[in-house]
């Protein structure tokens, strides 16, 4: 029986998508499978992590190698992503059998070994996350004193993209639409909402004219669309009152303090967006500062 690698890739992705992160998948893929990963996009797979597992397994399925060696490598890869949790590993082994893989005979690790491996994997993941976050914070501080302020708007887009990637937020870099008639600084998905992003890093605070473009872009988008206006030096006193008059309540404001709060770890990106969405929806406030969020959370 020829193993059905696609069936295994789909089933194991569903089992593991909440157990691991993208960087961990790639790290174990390179260390255990030792192949060049290819892309096998599947529209029905909505999870980035499940899609990445699918890519790795389909890639090794196309690699010429001994069937038993492939089965051993695939099993080791999946068990590592499961952090060797006994129940989850048993489910993965059953998926391997259903997919027609020869099951290698290996000694089962002890519970103590399982726990040690799981904790070690989590520790490495946390360390890698912190290293990336600190590198982004360093880049932020460098930009704040940059001798080329005219480039900071573009650099801010790159910094935000790095932050979205760190928090595994589905996102898109700067793009055009409507036959090149509109330039979008970036976009991302948070919960059920799709956000269009406008990034500004200028000496003067933003005014209502700076927001008009984003308001128009959101109005020309789907019903599940919102806008995030990120202005590092804030905005004029007229901006918030005018946004409150906007019946659609579709724009959130964020400033440099908000971005730095996430980069320092005071708030996660998801915590910041959740709080801002709640404030806009319940109180009609387009700006809920990170410092106030932290104070309200600790009170």
Image: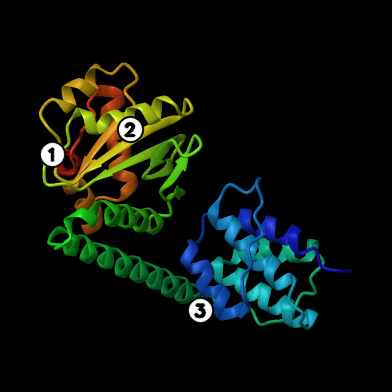
Considering every residue shown, the one lying at the far front of the view is 180
Residue at image coords 73%, 76%: 63
Q: Is residue 88 above or below residue 206?
A: below
Indicate whether 277 appears above or below 50.
above
Q: Quadrant of the C terminus?
A: top left
Q: Is residue 265 visible?
A: no
Secondary element type, mark 1: loop
Residue situated in front as seen by the camera: 262 or 110: 262
Q: Which mark is residue 61?
A: none
Residue 195 in percent (x, y) is at 40, 37
Decide which of tag 2 and tag 1 comes sooner along the chain: 1
The disc label shown at residue 113, or none: 3
Lower position in the chain sequence, tag 2 or tag 3: 3
Circle 3 packing at 10 Å, graded few (<14), some (14-19), many (20+), is few
x and y percent of residue 243 in the render? Answer: 23, 23
Instruction: Find residue 53 and report its image quarter.
Output: bottom right
Could you tell me residue 9's position as x and y percent? 69, 60
In the shown orientation, is residue 71 left or right of residue 266? Answer: right
Q: Quadrant of residue 61?
A: bottom right
Determine which of the numbered discs, if any, sits on residue 214 in the image. Answer: 2
Which is more foreground, mark 1 or mark 3?
1
């Amino acid at each position: 029986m020829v193993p059905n690698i696609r069936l295994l890739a789909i089933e194991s992705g569903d089992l593991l998508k909440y157990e691991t992160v993208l960087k961990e998948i790639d790290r174990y893929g390179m260390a255990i499978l030792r192949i060049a990963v290819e892309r096998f996009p599947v529209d029905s797979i909505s999870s980035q992590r499940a899609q990445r597992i699918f890519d790795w397994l389909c890639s090794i399925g196309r690699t010429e190698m001994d069937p038993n060696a492939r089965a051993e490598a695939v099993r080791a890869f999946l068990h590592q992503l499961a952090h060797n949790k006994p129940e989850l590993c048993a489910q993965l082994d059953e998926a391997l059998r259903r997919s027609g893989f020869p099951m290698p005979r290996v000694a089962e690790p002890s519970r103590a070994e399982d726990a040690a491996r799981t904790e070690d994997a989590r520790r490495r993941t946390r360390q890698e996350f912190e290293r990336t976050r600190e590198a982004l914070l360093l880049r932020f501080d460098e930009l704040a004193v940059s001798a080329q302020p005219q480039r900071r708007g573009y650099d801010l887009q790159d910094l935000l993209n790095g932050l979205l990637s760190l928090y595994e937020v589905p996102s898109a870099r700067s793009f055009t639409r409507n036959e090149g008639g509109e330039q979008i600084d970036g976009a991302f998905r948070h919960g059920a909402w799709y956000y269009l992003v406008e990034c500004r890093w200028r000496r003067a605070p933003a005014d209502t004219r700076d927001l008009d473009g984003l308001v128009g872009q959101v109005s020309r988008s789907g019903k599940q669309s919102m806008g995030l206006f990120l202005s590092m030096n804030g905005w004029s006193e007229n901006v918030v009152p005018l946004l409150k008059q906007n019946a659609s309540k579709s724009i959130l404001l964020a400033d440099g303090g908000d971005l730095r709060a996430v980069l320092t770890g005071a708030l996660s990106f998801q915590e910041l967006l959740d709080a801002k969405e709640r404030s806009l929806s319940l109180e009609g406030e387009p700006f809920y500062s990170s410092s106030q969020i932290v104070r309200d959370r600790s009170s």
